[in-house]
Amino acid sequence: MQYVNLLCAHAAKPSLREFAEAFFDAAGIVDGQERESSNYVEGRYFKGSRDGAEFTVSLSDEEGNEDLPVWVQVAANLDADGALDDALSRVVRERLLAAGFRVARMVNFGKRDEQRIDYA
């Protein structure tokens, strides 16, 4: 299983629900749904899938990245190393940025050596 962590924001979509609906629409995800879990900030998150990849959208409590308050974790079973990164980069560049989202990929998310790579 490959994972990619993104931090995101959209100025016109301030609530998590508005953000998730707009994110799923822009990314071409048609099966998005809201779920509840005490493991997530405010006890809720959104989940959807596309082309074998699962997207989980929730609020982030990541210090130092308050400008991008939404955490999107993407998981997929892909054979080739980096295949998820490549596919997701295309979705971000071709769909999400064009729809007004700000997106950063987080490498080693939550660890001391974490690195933030902003898409532009």
Image (tube, rainbow, N blue to C red):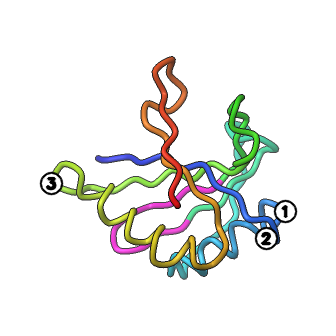
Image check: 17 left or right of 93?
right
User: Mark 2 — residue?
Assistant: 18
Drawn side of residue 92 relative to residue 81, left or right: right
Res 69 label: none
Where does the image place residue 7, in percent across and percent down from the top left? Answer: 60, 49
SS category of the residue bearing label 2: helix
- Cα separation between marks 1 and 3: 36 Å
Pointer 1 and pointer 2: residues touching (CB < 8 Å)?
yes
Secondary structure that dominates the magenta span:
strand
- Please name the residue shown 70% across and 58% down the image: 9
What amino acid is at disc 3?
Answer: Ala
Of the numbered discs in the image, which one, if any, rests on residue 14?
Answer: 1
Question: In the picture shown, does residue 83 fall above or below 7?
Answer: below
Q: Is residue 52 magenta?
A: yes
Q: Which residue is drawn at 62% across and 48% down?
A: 71
What is the spatial separation of the Cα atoms under label 1 and label 2, in whole angstroms?
Answer: 7 Å
Per the image, the residue denoted by label 3 is: 80
Judge depth for marks 1 and 2 and give the one in front.
Answer: 1
Q: Tag 3 or tag 1, which sits nearer the N-term? A: 1
Q: Which amino acid does label 1 sit on?
A: Pro
Q: Which of 89 and 34 is in front in this view?
A: 89
